[in-house]
Amino acid sequence: MRTRAVAAGVVLCTCLSLSGCSSPIADMPSLDAEAIVRPKEPGGYLPVNDVPRVRETPIISPEERAKIEKELTAMRDRQASATTGLKDR
């Protein structure tokens, strides 16, 4: 009697685990080429292989860019010197 219950439990668990791997027939692709429906408007995301175009004019001027890079370099140097002083303690 106990082995029959264990066997029934094993069969039930197997059926439940295998049913999770199946896919409904409605989700399967059809073989009819006309059945493929494409949206009229493109989605919000770019296709995988489509890259955005390069801007012809930069967003910021070269002078502003140089100024920002100079400020960031100065900040990095100040931070590096501050952390070096902490390590020496």
Image (cartoon, rainbow, N blue to C red):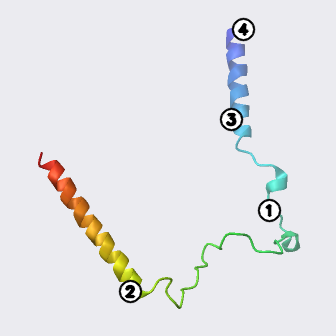
Residue under the image location 74 percent in, 45 percent down: 22
Dots 1 and 3: beta carbons under 8 Å? no
At which x and y percent is residue 12?
Answer: 73, 26
- Tell which circle, 2 or 3, labels the residue nearer the N-terminal end: 3
User: Which residue is drawn at the image coordinates 40% and 87% (left, top)?
Assistant: 62
Question: Could you tell me residue 3's position as x and y percent?
Answer: 67, 13
Q: Of discs 2 and 4, which sits in the foreground? A: 2
Q: Measure the alpha-carbon separation of dots 1 and 3.
A: 24 Å
Query: What's the amino acid at mark 1?
Result: Pro
- Judging by the rendered image, the residue that carries numbered circle 2 is 63
Task: Identify which residue, 8 or 68, lies in the foreground.
Answer: 68
- Numbered disc total: 4
Q: Earlier in the sequence, mark 4 or mark 1?
A: 4
Q: Which residue is mark 4?
A: 1
Residue at mark 2 to residue at mark 1: CA–CA distance: 56 Å
Give 75 or 56, whichever is nearer the viewer: 75
Image quarter in which the C terminus is found: top left
**Is the C-beta separation of discs 4 and 3 under 8 Å?**
no
Give residue 73's quadrant in the image: bottom left
Camera-side mark, 2 or 1: 2
- Disc 2 and disc 4: Cα gap in Å? 87 Å
| Three-letter amino acid code of the residue under disc 3 | Ser
Q: Point out the frontmost of discs 4 and 1.
A: 1
Q: CA distance from mark 2 to mark 3?
A: 64 Å
Dot 2 or dot 1: first in sequence order is: 1
Residue hosting label 3: 17
Task: Kindly identify the amino acid type of the residue bearing the numbered disc 4.
Answer: Met
Circles 2 and 3, Cβ within 8 Å, touching? The answer is: no
Q: Which residue is mark 1?
A: 29
